[in-house]
Image (cartoon, rainbow, N blue to C red):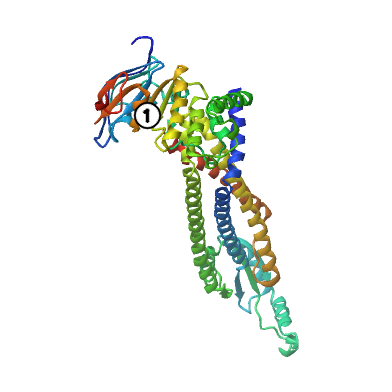
Amino acid sequence: MNDNTMIQFINVSKEFPNGTVGLKNIDVKIEEGEFVFLVGASGAGKSTFTKLMIREMMPTEGNILVNGKSINRLKQRQIPHFRRNIGFIFQNYRLLADRTAFENVAFAVEVLGASKREVERKVDYALRLVGLEDRKKHFPDELSGGEQQRVAIARAIVNNPQIIIADEPTGNLDPETAKGIMDILNDINIKGTTIVMATHDAGIVNRASHRVIELAHGEIVRDDKQGGYNIEIL
Amino acid sequence: MKFFRYLQYGFRDTLRSLWRHKGMVLVSVLTVATMLVALGAATLLAANSDYMAGKMADELEVIVYLNTDVAREEALALEPAMKAITGFESLEFVPKEAALEEMSTRFDETNLAVALGGTNPLPDAYKIKLEQPEQIAGAVAYLENTELFPQVEMVSYGQDVVENMIALTGTLEIACIALIIGMLLIALFMVNSTIRLTVATRGEEINIMKYVGATNFYVRIPFFLEGLVIGIVGALLADVVLYFGYDAILEYIEANISFITMLNDPQLMMLIMLVLLVGGTLLGAIGSNIAIKKYLKV
């Protein structure tokens, strides 16, 4: 593995207890600072791929290296520390309904044991980056879908992680708002953060010209350096 | 330093969560309180049954009537043999003169001594108390043995009352133990279900916390503290209801049903209240910790 590899799957397979194959013999490298789209039909293995990356589940076979370290060997108590280097963005935002935008972002910093002043500084900065500094006292149900997703992005980037995993982050948004979210993600990527984004949005993939990994039935069927959503587009 | 910050954030989150989920918190507190009141009431009922049975047993006595022709010296000489009865507690010799006097008080308009022409047809007697009602049958058999006690004319002991009481005390004891165990199981089930429900509504919160890298310890702090608060407040509420409720019942019974004497033991009451407080606290704290376990596996 060269020094720039951020994520590496080495012959990874995942079979579930009911016999369903999630992933089959996956060999892939993602470099530091890359923006990678993970595409494929529902059930193709995208979620399994992301869940394995954050050690939410273990592979049946093979090894996964993140930043040069095997995450298969992580002990249960080491997992929280490992995850602090990864930011997550979900399709349905997954904000805590009873906390304000500020509080939703803040608790990602508080879990590190940061001081109150540090929490305020980091959260204000993250909310400024996503353009929500004037909405920080609002609760999620007082924000639009796009604003909620921006809060989720602020939460994902607040600890300055090396990797961001985004699972259909524009899935619930209109095209205009989705474009705004993609602009923010691109800005984050330009600053050096590796982004792996699972998506069904062909327009976004085609416009961005990033690397595309396509999964089907748990296998990588395409890996294009600057691909489109469908192979026909190329 | 980090540890104290975790605690600081934990306390703040607990207060915030108690306030923002106040409806659910209230339901949990009331469930804990209701269950503990029921458990305390069952215990008090058991204690009262025991107390009343003991009181009735205390009043039971065996009366040994001697033949009227037995001389006073001979009657008094029987005392050591009476004291040898198994389960003997105390005895009282009732000379026939005292018996006549006692009987006279029941017929206050008639002068019995005059009516009887100065004679006294009553015998000397012994009133014997035993430690346990179960020992009465053996004592009666012993006293009715004419070879040992030819001076004895008759032994009276309220056979029906004794037999019924022995049966009733046994049944009551079993019923009370069953009631307490039953209430305890129901309380555990209800409180556990309520806490599980409270935690389940916040499973998403735990999930997200785990995704951003919170340790299990950090996640547990506010839930543990919330469970603790719910347990303590619920138990205190139960204690207040039990204390004043029982006091009101005592007063009512004393004023209106004079033939029933209920147990009035402040020490026992304090003990029950303390046990409920400790039990409620543990129930809340441990219950919430067990309930969040499955949400931590992310």
Image quadrant where one finds the N terminus of chain A: top left
Residue B48, image x and y in percent? 60, 61
- Please tell me which residue is depicted at 60% across the width and 30% down the height of the picture: B7
Chain letter behind tag 1: A
**Is A35 positioned to the left or the right of A135 in the image?**
left
Dot 1 falls on a residue whose secondary structure is helix
Q: Is residue B203 above or below residue A123?
A: below
Which three-letter amino acid code belongs to the residue tagged 1?
Ile
Residue B5, image x and y in percent? 61, 27
Q: Closest to the observer: B86 or B52?
A: B52
- Please tell me which residue is depicted at 28% across the width and 21% down the height of the picture: A223
Q: Closest to the observer: A6 or B267?
A: A6
Residue B147 in sight in this render: no
Q: Residue furthest top?
A: A2
Q: Closest to the observer: B206 or B100?
A: B206
- Please tell me which residue is depicted at 64% across the width and 24% down the height of the picture: A117
Give the quadrant of residue A134: top right
Image quadrant where one finds the C terminus of chain A: top left
Q: Which residue is mark 1?
A: A204
Q: Is residue A82 above or below residue B221?
A: above
Q: Is residue A85 above or below residue B82?
A: above
Q: Closest to the observer: A179 or B224?
A: A179
Residue A131 in sight in this render: yes
